[in-house]
Structures are given as structure tokens and as C-alpha cells.
Image: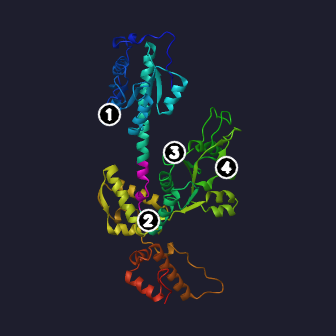
Amino acid sequence: MVRLRPSTLRAPPSALPEETALPASPAPSSSSSSRRSRVLVVDDEELYRSALERILARVGHQVVTARDASEAIAIVAAAPVDLVLCDYKMPGINGLEVIRQIHDLAPDLPCIIITGYGTPETSIEALRAGAHWYLEKPFEQEQLDVIRRLVDQAIEHGRLKSENRLLQHQLRSKYKFDNIIGRSAALQKVLGLVEKVAETDSTVLITGESGTGKELIARAIHYNSRRADRMLVTVNCGAIPEELLESELFGHVKGAFTNAIQHREGRFSLADGGTIFLDEIGDMSPNLQVKLLRALQERTFEPVGSSKTERVDVRVIAATNQHLTTLIEQKRFREDLYYRLNVLPVEMPPLRERGDDLALLVHHFLDRARIERGSRVTGLSDEAMQHLLAHDWPGNIRELENLIERLLVLNTAGEIGVDDLPADFRGRRTPARVHDAPRVPPSGLDFNQVVDQLEVDLILQALEHTHWNKNRAAQLLGLNRTTLEGKIRKRGLVPPGSGSRS
């Protein structure tokens, strides 16, 4: 921004340029908002109020004026204003106090201080009070274009602040824990944990299969934390080549390597004051793990090619679909980094273990499609839903979402039936697909005993997957409910914690 300094020879106030003397300015673009910007000019001297009103009205702004603080506050409280230009020295309350009171009403409203007593101390005081910038009077002919640019810049700055505040509010609302779809015990246990985790600044490690919603949980943690007003910066460690990932995380200086033609901030710097989400952390190279460990321990790092240490205040959330303990055994992941990341572990349950959440998610994706696409699909038939319930969902929620999108592309209206499902969803799932057949040892085996044990294992698997919902367990096994109940009674099977087998 440019400080408007008066020239050595100032025109007296009586020589303020008239409207006819103003240089021509282009009219507001037709692509701009249909509502003209509303600018409030506050000054106890009518000469300056009138001059600013002419200057701003000429370039398309709607101008309202006030003679003192009480009029200014009343105008801001009564109707939206896009910018305030306020004189510094007025009878009663001065301009700085006016700005403070205005910001109590409208925190994002930009204000420019006008002063005839320009000193460095006055300028600093104005900025500390919340002023966007300041102008010195009297105004001169050569300053008029600069005034207009400064006004436009301040209005745009206020608009961006307002939009950013609205976006932050929408993100907080979107990622409320209550908005995460699911009522199964497995998911509710996770949500209860992350609700407590969000209140802290501790490092979080989210584990779980691909497609279980790890990034969704990371965003929920951030937007329900005290850092929600600052940035959430996401880095997919598996998608960025190893030789570029260090620069991506910590930045680099000009000339650090080939094609490093300018200084670049890293993701840790961008996330200062906020949260950095390191997705697929298990794919990070051992060399870079050492530098990440230091950044976690000391909250300091050096950009590539620099010897200058930078310090940041960043909360770290990491996620992986790999078993890090296995990678540690294979010498592919540092044990000390694992313990530094695993301060607050959160394990996401796979979809097959989330009971009745499947039906809720199906209806959620269908409802969203009706809103976003205008889809006229009314839902899934009961038989089609049963086939979805019998599926193992190796791709979890992502697989389900992709399936629903596919079904809606191929079906434009009505109810989706079994024949509309892909072939691998229509076939009956046999026990051979969920259990490996035992090997016959050279010494032989007791056939009936092995078959009996296999039957018990399969029944228990189905019951555990469905949380002992016998209807759904029978569907998974391809049995009638009465047949399954007979086998349960015969084997004396009971839910965990309800007593021993009879």
C-alpha cells in the first residue's frame, strides 16, 4: 500500500478540485456486482466531506456522510457499508475510537483514517486501532487516482475478509461431528475420541484402510479446534516424488537446486498457527523422516539450501493405511518417529464393521445426488440393498460412493433394482471367498472335526460382522434365519460378554 504524502506546495482547502476538474475514470465494469459499493465519509468539516463525496461518486460509489461519531455509528448499525473514511481529529470522540466502535458492530468493515496531523506515531496508532490505511489532507490533484485505488483496494480487502469469515463458518458447520454420517457403535466410539482430541494441540495419528474417511476425520479435528480460524494444509506424502517432498514441506531458497528460480514457502510455513495434515505418512522416505522428526520435536526446520532456522507453531495430524509397526520391523519407518506421531492414535473402522451405517450412507449419497444433479432416482429396492449389505467393501466408503455415482449415471429415474447392480454385487458370496480351506497334513486329519470347526468359524465371523444381527448374518452366509438359529443353538454360541457356551 502507498502512503499519500503531501507535496511541498499544498493547495489550501479552498482550492480543493471541483467535480468538473476531476480526470476521467472508467465506469465500473459490467461484470462487477450489481450493488454499488457504499462508502461512509465521516468528517466534521463540510468542505472535506463534499470533496470526498464528489471524488468517490464520480467513479461509481454510493456515498453517505456523517459529521460526527454518533451519526457514523448509527449509519453503520442501520444498513451495510463497504468502507469507512473517517477523520482523525473531531469534536468529542476521535477517529480511532470511532473505528473501534465500528469494528464492534462490523469486524470485517475496512476503515481508512484521514488526518491533517500526519506523524509516524499517528500512522502506527491508526493501524493498531484497526485502520486499513490512512490518508493525509489536504488532498491534491495528483493524489486523486491514488485515493481511488486505495479505496477500491480497501473495499476488496473487506470483501475478501467477509468471504473468508463466511467460508470458515461454513467449514465449521460442515465438519461438525454431528454431520458425520453413521450411528454404529464402532463409528460413535471414534467420534467420541476425536471430539476430545480436537480440544488439544497434541499430534494425532489416524490409521485405517483406504476409503474409511481418514481425511474427513482430520478436517473435523481441525475445524473443531482452537486453530479453526487458521489454515489446514494437506500434503499427500505418497503422491509427491521423494526428491520434491522436502521442498514441498519445508520450502527452498533461490538457487537451492536446478529450477529453483525463486524463494518458495513450504507447507509447514503456510500452516503456521494452524494444522498440517500429512496423509500417507508411511510412504515417506527414511531420510526425510529424520527431518520430519526434528520438525515435530523442536517445531523448527531449515528450507532446502538455507542455513537459517525457521520456527513455526503447527499442529500435526498424520494418516496412513499401512501398518507402521510392520514397516518398523522392515526398517522402512523410524521407530522414534512412530512414537512421536502416535501421541493420540485414532483407528478408523472399515465399512464392513459399521453395521447399519451402510444404509444411512446409501441414502445420504442418493439425497445429495438429488440436490446436486436433480436426479429422479427414488432409491434402492430391498433386494438390491440386501446385496449391498452382503458385500465386503474392500474400498470402504470411497467404493460405496463410486458405486452410487455409477448407478445414478446409468439410471436416471425410478428405483434401482438387483439387475442394475454390477455383476460382482449380484452373485451370492460363498464361504470359500471369506475363509481359506485348511491343508491336509501328511499325517491326516479328523474330517468331521475340521468341518465342524470351519462351520463355527464362519458363523462367528458373520455374527461379528453384523454385531449379532441374525437376519443379516444369515444373508451373509446364504442361509435361512431358522437354519442359522438352529446351528447357533446346536453349537451353544452366544454374544461376547453374555456368558459362556452351554
Distance of mark 1 from mark 3, alpha carbons? Answer: 35 Å
> Disc 4 residue type?
Glu
Is residue 179 a member of the stretch shown in magenta? yes
Q: Nearer the viewer, mark 4 or mark 1?
A: 1
Specify the label residue 167 is tagged with.
none
Asked if one can make out residue 159 in the rendered structure from this viewpoint, the answer is no
- Earlier along the polypeptide chain: callout 4 or callout 1? 1
Dot 1 or dot 2: first in sequence order is: 1
The residue drawn where x is 44% and y is 87% is 489
Say which label, 4 or 2, has the lower sequence index.
4
> Which amino acid, mark 3?
Met
- Return the mark for residue 231: 3
Picture coordinates of residue 377 (x, y %)?
30, 57
Mark 3: secondary structure? loop
Q: Which residue is mark 1?
A: 74
Q: Is residue 134 magenta?
A: no
Residue 169 rendering spot, x and y as whole percentages: 41, 47
* Residue holding disc 2: 424
Question: Which is closer to the viewer, label 1 or label 2?
Answer: 1
Residue at numbered disc 4: 298
